[in-house]
Image (spheres, rainbow, N blue to C red):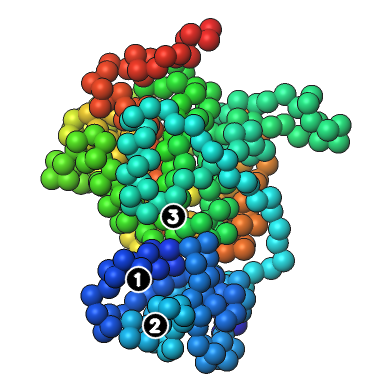
Amino acid sequence: MSTASKQYPACPKGVYSLRRFLTAVESDAWPSNDARVTVGGRLAIPFLADEGGRIELPREFFESGQAENDELWCVSFLMSDFDPQLRAVRRVVESQCLTKSIREVTWSRPKSQNILAWGPFVDGIKDHLRNLGLQEITTPTVVQNPGMEPELEPFCITTNTRPQADRSRPLFLATSPELHIKQLLALGYTDVFEIKTVYRKEELTPLHEPEFHMLEWYRGYADLDLIIDDLTSLLGNVANINENEIKHTTIRELFRVTGFELKPNSSAQELFDLAKRLELHPNERMDWNDLFHLIWVTKVEPRLPKDPLFVRDYPPSQAALARKNASGWADRLEFYWQGVEIANAFHELNDPNEQRLRFLSDQKKRIEYGRTPLEIDENFMQSLEFGMPPSGGIALGVDRLFMLVQDAPNLQSVRAFGWKHQL
């Protein structure tokens, strides 16, 4: 198989990371030797390996000439052909390469640190995620790239304390741990989470503070459906939200309240005409996303039900770091509760070429929006080149969820030191 022909496919259904597979084997969770199992990992000839462990593959698998060290593969076999004591597979039934062959790359590998516990609510979240098989990690707070989203403005840190040669390059407070967690995914840490204090320059509102706690977790060799299962389980445990209470919809269905049938290829002119019909007074300088947000914030979001709500299939221009699905929509989900946005989940993009194109587009938009210019995080890009597995991931606002669980009116009322305390 030539390197040029290899793509970055979505994860096939039912694939186990090595950690999930070996944990199930040790707990005798498999029903019978007739079961067929698909496991994903990185090739370290003659092993399939990652942070969760390793299994030995038969010599015939590598003698085909298709497999190279450090590639990500999914390998299927029958449990009757697996020796749990030797952790060896006698026969491979089917296999699929998930990434291209890597080039020579290096990047900074962050070190883990302990994270302080901040109360029973957060402990309950952590305990539940651990019970789901996720492991806690930590990432930097002071970063060179805080996230490329054009809508976000980071806090810049003075460069005077840096070495003389580096003082021309600013540092920022992290707006999200996403880029660093994905570097860990590429290293084999496939089921991980972090609760982190993050920082964004935003207006003070009942739902916005410049400093807040974000929970992110990621599942390697998984898609958005597994993240939805995790989220549903977590909400039941820490917020007493029953799965049957959660409503499911799409952006397209919600947009119908405007009398317009939104499509993945709907044009900016169509949205402009719609905004005029709705008497929202759009101006000619607005791009597609500006017009969408104008209509969404004024006409759609205020009419969201108060029930727990999963909203899926976002416009492709709002894919951010998510894949696009077969229908052309961004494979992205947001969770709303009492009309408040709580979480944002992606079927993660792991194609470095597509990701660079999106980052270049984000750089242009940041300039157009008057945002701070940002360099592309080449450490993150090299981790994609190294091979990040197809993954699902989610970011959840812990403060907002806690606020609603406590039936509090705003974020300030559930914090010991709100931002206004600093002013």
**Residue at the image point whose x is 53% and y is 10% from the top:** 422
Picture layout, residue 220 above or below residue 126:
below
* Residue closest to the eye, 403 or 320: 403
Q: Measured from the top left, where is residue 125 in percent x and y? A: 34, 38
Left or right, 415 with respect to 104, comes to left
**Residue at the image point whose x is 37% and y is 59% from the top:** 223
Which amino acid, by three-letter code, is at mark 2?
A: Phe
* Residue closest to the eye, 85 or 24: 85
Tag shown at residue 46 = none
Label 1 residue SS: helix
Disc 2 target residue: 82
Q: Measured from the top left, where is residue 321 in percent x and y? A: 48, 49
Disc 3 target residue: 191
Q: Can you see residue 115?
A: yes
Q: Residue furthest front?
A: 85
Left or right, 138 with respect to 123, comes to right
Q: Residues within 10 Å of mark 2 (few under 14, many from 20)?
A: many
Viewer-nearest of discs 2 and 3:
2
Q: Residue furthest left?
A: 244
- Mark with earlier residue (1, 2): 1
